[in-house]
Structures are given as C-alpha cells and as structure tokens.
C-alpha cells in the first residue's frame, strides 16, 4: 500500500512541477514591457512596481508548492 501512496505522490510532484514550469514566466511579458517604459508617469510607476511584486509573489508561491510537494514525497517510506 505504501508503494501506491508513493507512486501517487510522485505523480503529484511531477504535476506540480509541470504547472510551476508553465506559469513561472506568466508575468514576464508585462514586466519586460514596463522595463522598456511602455507606460510612464505616476500610474505607470505604480503598475510597474505592482507587476514586479506580483511576479515575485507568484514565483515564491510556485517555488513553495514544489518544495512542499517534494518534502511530502521525501517523508513517505520507500517501497519494501
């Protein structure tokens, strides 16, 4: 039974990693545009700060999800 749990958790870890990889770059186009001064002035500066903060937060959440899943997998017993 432990082997099935471990296999299921391995599949979960792989799925979380794939989702993380797919979404890691989600805000890059907006960040690059803002770095190129696509929108200037006070509203542009505010949006620039927010989109970069959102990018950092997204990446932190994705990294934490991957880390947490890997920790859970590592805590499961190996197959006998």
Image (cartoon, helix red, strand yellow):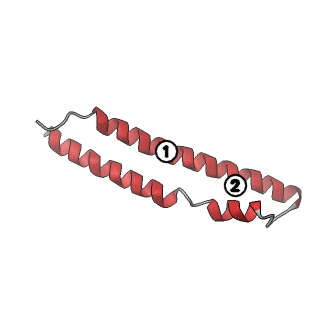
SS class of the residue under badge 1?
helix
Residue extending farthest right: 41
In this view, the residue in front, 47 or 56, is: 56
**Does 80 sit left or right of 24 as displayed?**
left
Q: Residues within 10 Å of mark 2 (few under 14, many from 20)?
A: some
The correct choice, above or below, for 6 with respect to 77 in the image is below
**Does 73 sit left or right of 1 as displayed?**
right
Query: Residue 73 at what x, y percent from top left?
Result: 30, 39
Residue extending farthest left: 80
Q: Earlier in the sequence, mark 2 or mark 1?
A: 2
In the image, what residue occupies the spot 72% across and 51% down? Answer: 50
In the image, what residue occupies the spot 33% across and 37% down? Answer: 72
Query: Residue 17 at what x, y percent from top left?
Result: 40, 52
In the image, what residue occupies the spot 75% across and 60% down? Answer: 35
Residue 78's image quarter? top left
The quadrant of the rendering that contains the C terminus is top left
Q: Which residue is mark 1?
A: 63
Q: Which residue is mark 2?
A: 51
**Does 77 sit left or right of 24 as displayed?**
left
Query: Residue 4 at what x, y percent from top left?
Result: 17, 45
Which-is-in-front pick, marks 2 and 1? 1
In the image, what residue occupies the spot 36% across and 36% down? Answer: 71
SS class of the residue under badge 2?
helix
Q: Residues within 10 Å of mark 1 (few under 14, many from 20)?
A: some
Query: Residue 14 at what x, y percent from top left?
Result: 34, 52
Gap between marks 2 and 1 measured at Cα: 18 Å
**Does 3 sit left or right of 59 as displayed?**
left
The quadrant of the rendering that contains the N terminus is top left
In this view, the residue in front, 43 or 23, is: 23
Are the residues tagged 2 and 1 within 8 Å (C-beta)?
no
């Amino acid at each position: 039974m432990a082997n099935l749990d471990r296999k299921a958790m391995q599949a979960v870890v792989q799925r979380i990693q794939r989702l993380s990889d797919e979404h890691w770059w989600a805000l890059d186009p907006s960040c690059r545009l803002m770095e190129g001064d696509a929108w200037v002035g006070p509203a542009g500066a505010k949006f620039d700060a927010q989109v970069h903060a959102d990018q950092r937060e997204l990446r932190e959440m994705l990294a934490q999800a991957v880390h947490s899943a890997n920790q859970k997998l590592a805590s499961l017993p190996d197959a006998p």
